[in-house]
Image (cartoon, helix red, strand yellow):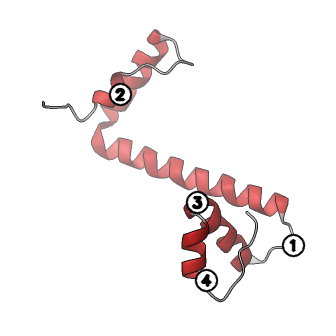
Amino acid sequence: MLVRPDAALDSVPHDTDAESHAVQMEIYRRLGPTGRSQAAFRLMALAREIAVAGIRARHPHYNEQQVRMALVRLRLGDEVARSVWPAEGLVDP
C-alpha cells in the first residue's frame, strides 16, 4: 500500500472544526517539506524553552548544569540521565 507523505495531515483533531482544519492543512501543504520542517524545529525549540522555564521556576537555585541535567532527565528519562552523568545524582526536573 502506498501512503502519501502528507496523509497524516488529513486526520481532523477532535478539538478543531473541519473548516479550520482544512485551512490549516492547506497552509501546511503550501509550506512544503522544507517549511514544515522549519516549523517543526521552531516548535521543538519552543518546547525546550518552556521546559527549561518550568525547571527554573520550580528550582530557582539550580545552576546551568543542574538545569541541563534536569532537562535531560525530563526529556529522556532516568536511565539516560544516569548514563550521561554516572557520578552525579539525579536532579528533579
Q: Secondary structure at mark 4?
A: loop
Residue at position x 75%, y 61% in the image: 55
Q: Amino acid at mark 4?
A: Trp
Q: Amino acid at mark 2?
A: Leu
Q: Secondary structure at mark 3?
A: helix
Precedes in sequence: disc 4 or disc 2:
2
- Residue nearest the viewer, comparing 26 with 11: 11
Residue 57 lies, in percent from the top left, at: 83, 58
Asked if 53 appears above or below 78 in the picture, the reply is above
In the picture, which quadrant includes the N terminus? top left
Residue at position x 38%, y 27% in the image: 27
Q: Amino acid at mark 1?
A: His
Q: Which residue is mark 4?
A: 85
Whole-Å distance between the Cαs marked 3 and 1? 21 Å
Whole-Å distance between the Cαs marked 3 and 4? 15 Å
Residue 41 lies, in percent from the top left, at: 45, 52
Residue 43 lies, in percent from the top left, at: 52, 47
Q: Which residue is mark 1?
A: 61
Q: Secondary structure at mark 1?
A: loop
